[in-house]
Image (cartoon, grey):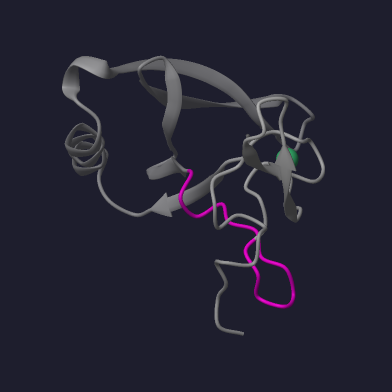
């Protein structure tokens, strides 16, 4: 699933406190990695230390160069130009599909996975 990043300008301590308030402290882990971020004037790699945060083993945030980056799912919403909300998975419309049991299932028209009502069916829209 695609994830957007949200940039947060606070201190690392406050950033960690915010993560702890969102996820339980037991589920959070952090690890430091060195990442090649750029080339210097001599063509040598510049390394930056990143702190990666994991909540239940899922990468949820990164601290880098004095800034926090949080991965947020909620803001990843796709909208059609008409204002209709599209599916989170593919940004497509959805349609009702009848399964073998005769149940109506709302499915993404692109990947055919089940999606919750409101995604791509025209029920949910934003003002444009
Ligand atoms: Zn899909």
Q: Is residue 79 magenta?
A: yes
> Residue 48 location, x and y as percent?
53, 28
Q: Residue at x 61, y 85 (%)?
A: 128
Magenta portion: prevailing SS class: loop
Q: x, y percentage for residue 33? A: 49, 16
Quadrant location of residue 31?
Answer: top left
Tell me residue 22's x, y (percent): 24, 38
81 lies left or right of 57: right
Judge by depth and name the residue closer to the eye, 16 or 76. 76
Span highlighted in magenta in the image: 73-85
In the rendered view, would you say 30 is above or below 89? Answer: above
116 sits left or right of 9 in the view: right
| Numbered marks: total | 0
- Name the residue: 22% across, 42% down: 18
For ligand 1, the image quadrant comes to top right
Write the residue at 48% across / 44% down. 73
Q: Quadrant of residue 70?
A: top left
For image coordinates 64% across by 67% down, the residue present is 122
- Between residues 24 and 53, which one lies in front from this camera angle? 24
Q: Nearer the viewer, residue 100 or 1?
A: 100
- Which quadrant is the N terminus positioned in? top right
Q: Is 11 positioned to the left or the right of 45 in the image?
A: left
């Amino acid at each position: 699933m695609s994830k957007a990043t949200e940039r947060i300008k606070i201190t690392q301590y406050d950033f960690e406190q915010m993560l702890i308030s969102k996820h339980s402290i037991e589920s959070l882990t952090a690890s430091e990695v060195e990442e090649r971020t750029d080339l210097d004037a001599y063509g040598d790699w510049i390394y930056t230390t990143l702190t990666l945060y994991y909540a239940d083993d899922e990468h949820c945030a990164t601290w880098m160069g004095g800034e926090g980056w949080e991965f947020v799912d909620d803001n990843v919403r796709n909208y059609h130009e008409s204002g209709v909300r599209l599916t989170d998975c593919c940004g497509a419309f959805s349609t009702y599909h009848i399964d073998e049991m005769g149940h109506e299932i709302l499915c993404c028209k692109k990947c055919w996975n089940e999606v919750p009502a409101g995604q791509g069916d025209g029920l949910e829209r934003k003002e444009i």
